[in-house]
């Protein structure tokens, strides 16, 4: 089983090297770098330096278009949305909502541009982070609904038809972006995490031909769940990945863990590993210290992650 880590990054190469070396030393094989839109525009040092430094240390480096268009997992501030109001989702009543529509061609084109830049820089893999159901009724959603055989106006679609269309939109985004990556270079890896709350979209996503890696993030604490639930979601995602011949990647929660509950991180790591995924990643670096999703006691959470990785490495 490969071990990985979500890393928020640094724009100064010397800091990137220090952090990535620490991750290599604690047993990581792979590092997912959170690349926000702002990083491409304002902090390109982080975007540009991570692959070369990571490769020098023997790490695989994964690009995550983090919080892209305020529509996907992660930190959300979007230059695309401020530059292009047309990308905003359209509510049923016709008003606009400040989150990008994943069916909008301009959103997809911007995602492709960032992927193209990353591919030139040598990233090994591309990760579509928590694509989720959107409640958008823009002209592009309407057109896709009609093209998929939907009858009439999307705003008046039956609940079951609407749910199916939303789930199909998740799979369509992952399929189209993954195919784009493979057209750039077939050796590049494509990966996604579809949340347990979007389990209805799991199978259609896992079945995507251009997708190499499928998984989910059983973040028990923020959903008020327990370790039995972590086992159940892990088992289901790993089984589904195997059925479709995909690499499985499971996420371990080390963000927003309340003080005094850090032991659960080690417990969950053991439970996830026992289900035999191909990779286990943790969100995120140093208990997400210094971010708005930090653990209450990031140092204690990070110590628990280090102990968990030591135990998994034997
Ligand atoms: Zn839309």
Image: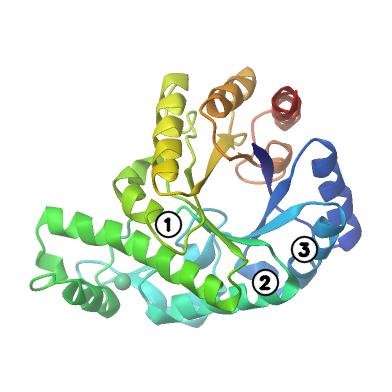
Q: Which structural element holds mark 3?
A: helix
Q: Which structural element holds mark 2?
A: helix
94 versus 204 height, above or below: below
* Residue occupied by mark 1: 131
| Image coordinates for residue 146, horizontal then vertical, percent | 17, 75
Q: Is mark 1 within 8 Å of ligand 1?
A: no
Q: Which structural element holds mark 1?
A: loop
| Image coordinates for residue 241, horizontal then vertical, percent | 44, 44
281 versus 194 height, above or below: above
Front one among 79 and 133: 133
* Residue occupied by mark 2: 118
Tag of residue 51: 3
| Image coordinates for residue 138, horizontal then vertical, percent | 27, 75
Q: Quadrant of residue 172?
A: bottom left
Distance in Å between CA atoms under marks 2 and 1: 20 Å
Residue at figure coordinates x 78%, y 52% from the top left: 59
281 versus 78 height, above or below: above
> 76 left or right of 2?
left
Residue at figure coordinates x 62%, y 34% from the top left: 254
Residue at figure coordinates x 82%, y 43% from the top left: 24
Q: Are marks 2 and 1 in contact (CB under 8 Å)?
A: no
| Label 1 packing within 10 angstroms: few (<14), some (14-19), many (20+) | many
> 260 left or right of 152?
right
> Which numbered mark, 1 or 3, is in the foreground of this view?
3
Front one among 242 and 249: 242
Front one among 8 and 60: 60
């Amino acid at each position: 089983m490969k071990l990985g880590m979500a890393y928020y990054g640094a724009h100064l190469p010397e800091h990137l090297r220090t952090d990535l070396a620490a991750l290599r030393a604690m047993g990581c094989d792979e590092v997912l770098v959170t690349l926000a839109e702002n990083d491409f525009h304002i902090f390109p040092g982080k975007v540009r330096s991570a692959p070369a430094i990571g490769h020098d240390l023997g790490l695989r480096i994964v690009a995550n278009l983090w919080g892209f268009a305020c529509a996907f997992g992660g930190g959300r501030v979007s230059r695309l949305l401020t530059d292009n109001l047309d990308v905003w989702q359209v509510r049923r009543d016709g008003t606009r909502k400040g989150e990008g529509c994943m069916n909008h061609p301009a959103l997809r084109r911007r995602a492709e541009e960032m992927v193209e830049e990353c591919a030139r820089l040598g990233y090994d893999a591309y990760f579509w982070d928590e694509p989720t159901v959107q409640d958008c009724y823009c002209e592009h959603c309407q057109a896709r609904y009609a093209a998929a055989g939907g009858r009439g106006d999307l705003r008046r679609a039956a609940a079951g038809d609407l749910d199916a269309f939303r789930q199909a939109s998740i799979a369509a985004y992952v399929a189209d972006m993954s195919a784009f990556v493979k057209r750039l270079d077939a050796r590049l890896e494509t990966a996604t995490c579809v949340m347990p709350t979007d389990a209805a979209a799991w199978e259609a996503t896992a079945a995507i031909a251009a997708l190499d890696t499928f998984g989910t993030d059983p973040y028990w604490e923020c959903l008020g769940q327990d370790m039995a639930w972590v086992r159940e979601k892990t088992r289901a995602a790993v089984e589904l990945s195997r059925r479709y011949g995909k690499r499985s990647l499971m996420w371990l929660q080390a963000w927003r863990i309340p003080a005094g509950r850090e032991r659960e991180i080690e417990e969950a790591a053991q439970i996830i590993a026992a289900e035999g995924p191909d990779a286990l990643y943790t969100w995120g670096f140093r208990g997400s210290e210094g971010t708005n999703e930090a653990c209450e006691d990031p140092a204690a959470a990070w110590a628990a992650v280090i102990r968990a990785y030591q135990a998994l490495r034997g």
